[in-house]
Each structure stands twice: as C-alpha cells, then as structure tokens.
Image: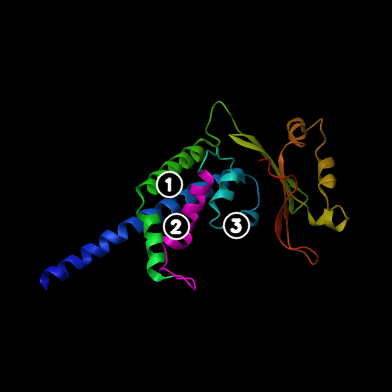
C-alpha cells in the first residue's frame, strides 16, 4: 500500500510534464510573435495596438503573417498545432463530443502531446520565430527607417520601412478632418506633399496601409487594412 502511495505523485509528474512543456512552447511562440508585433506597430496609438492584440488572440499563424515571418513547409500546421495546445490540449480536461468514446478522444490527445516529433517540430519553430523577431530592426544590412507625425490635435500618421518588415503606413483621421468631411486616405495624403516627404510618397503605393478608426456615432473603433496582405 505504501508503495502505491509513493508512485501516485510520480505518475502525476510524468503525465503533467509533457502537457506543461507543450503549453510553455505555445506560450513562448505567442510571446515572441506579439513582441514582434510591437515593432511593426511603431508610432500607432496604444488603443489600436491593444485592440489588435485582442483581435489576433491566439491566432499564431495570423500573427506570424503580420510580422512577415519566413514560412516553410509545415509551418502553418505547426502554428495551428501550437494554437490548439494553448487553447485546449495542454490546458483543459478532455471534452468528449457526442457520439465519440472517452478513451478514443483521450488517446488522440495523448498521442499529440507525447509525440517526440511534434515537440521537435514545435521547438524548432519556436527557435526560428525567436530569431526572426530578434532580427527585426536589428539588422545592419536591412536598416529600419521610422517616422510619425501628428495631424491636428488627435490624428496621426506613422510610417516605417526596412528592419525586415514590409513598408507600413498607419493613420488616424483627426476630428477636424472628420468634421470637415475628409474621411478617406486620399484626404490624408495631400498633407504630406511628395517634395517634402519623398520616402513616404515613394512607398505609399506599395506599403501595407492601415486606418486606426476611432469610435464615433457612425463608426466603431477598429483597424481597417486599405491594401490586402500580399501572400
């Protein structure tokens, strides 16, 4: 009887370690990706960043695309696998769908968690994500240029190029502009004439452009991408 009592905590430790390892791997990848996001969102409002971080949630694949991660074959599946570890597999007890057996569901999850191949793939991906984020704005061969300008009292335009990220323009219309009916990207651009803002205008047609929309009576607070993400 004493031997069985002695083995019980060891068994809990054995079964808990793989789950903890997978959960920590998932959280580490998410942490690296969101650290990269802070660099991509240079000059943006805090409200926009906080809103978009919540919008991305645990969608690791979308986060990776947003910071221009260099994808390889199998990465999409591994990002999805880590997402499932964070959301369900390594975090919560088994929930058995109607019509399925408990043992089958448990065994499927156990195979995913205890798989050495899965762990090795996830670990390698975590290392690549970490190195990618570390190099953002820290590559002497791909220097970052960043500027931000205030528009009236409550508007702004932020621009960044280089640093291993695609050119990016983010703007928020001021209340003065909105009151005057100037509510489009075309109304913002004339404030930055090409003769004075050569670099900004050079990349205007190729940059990822976002509008940081503030909440009004007719609009909700959101981020609107003006140019689709280029795959």
The residue lying at 54 percent from left, 27 percent from top is 140
The residue at which mark 3 appears reads as 50
Disc ID at residue 85: 2
Residue at 49%, 38% in the rendered image: 134
| Foreground label between 1 and 3 | 1
Mark 1 or mark 2: name the one nearer the start of the chain: 2
Q: Is residue 148 left or right of residue 100?
A: right
Above or below residue 142? Residue 216 is below
Q: Residue 175: x and y, percent?
A: 80, 57
**How far is the residue under mark 1 from the one under mark 3?**
27 Å
User: What stretch of residues is rendered in magenta?
Assistant: 75-100
* Residue 58 vertical position relative to residue 218 in the rendered view, above or below: above
Look at the numbered discs 1 and 2 and tell me whether their residues touch, using CB distance below 8 Å: yes
Q: Residue at x 40, y 44 (%)?
A: 123
User: Where does label 1 land, which residue?
Assistant: 122
Labels 1 & 3 near each other (Cβ < 8 A): no
Task: Indicate left or right for 156 with 30 as reference.
Answer: right
Q: Nearer the viewer, mark 2 or mark 3?
A: 2
In the structure shown, which secondary structural element does the residue marked by tag 1 occupy?
helix
Decide: is 167 above or below 35.
above
Q: Is residue 88 magenta?
A: yes
What residue do we see at 54% from left, 44% from top?
36
Q: Which quadrant does the N terminus fall into?
A: bottom left
For mark 1, does the 10 Å Cα neighbourhood hold few (<14), some (14 to 19), or many (20 or more) residues? Answer: many
């Amino acid at each position: 009887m004493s031997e069985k009592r002695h083995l019980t905590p060891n068994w809990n430790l054995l079964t808990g370690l793989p789950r903890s390892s997978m959960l920590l791997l998932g959280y580490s990848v998410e942490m690296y990706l969101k650290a990269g996001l802070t660099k991509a969102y240079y000059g943006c409002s805090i409200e926009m960043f906080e809103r978009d971080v919540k919008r991305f949630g645990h969608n690791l694949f979308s986060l990776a695309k947003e910071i221009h991660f260099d994808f390889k074959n199998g990465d999409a599946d591994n990002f999805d696998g880590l997402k499932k570890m964070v959301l369900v597999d390594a975090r919560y007890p088994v929930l058995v769908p109607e019509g399925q057996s408990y043992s089958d569901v448990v065994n499927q999850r156990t195979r995913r968690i205890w798989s050495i191949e899965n762990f090795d793939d996830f670990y390698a991906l975590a290392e690549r994500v970490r190195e990618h984020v570390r190099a953002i704005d820290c590559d002497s061969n791909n220097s970052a240029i960043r500027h931000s300008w205030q528009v009236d009292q409550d508007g702004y335009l932020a621009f960044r190029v280089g640093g291993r990220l695609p050119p990016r323009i983010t703007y928020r219309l001021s209340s003065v502009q909105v009151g005057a009916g100037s509510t489009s990207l075309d109304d913002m651009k004339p404030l930055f004439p090409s003769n004075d803002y050569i670099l900004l205008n050079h990349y205007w047609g190729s940059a990822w452009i976002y509008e940081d929309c503030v909440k009004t009576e007719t609009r909700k607070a959101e981020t609107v991408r003006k140019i689709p993400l280029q795959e």
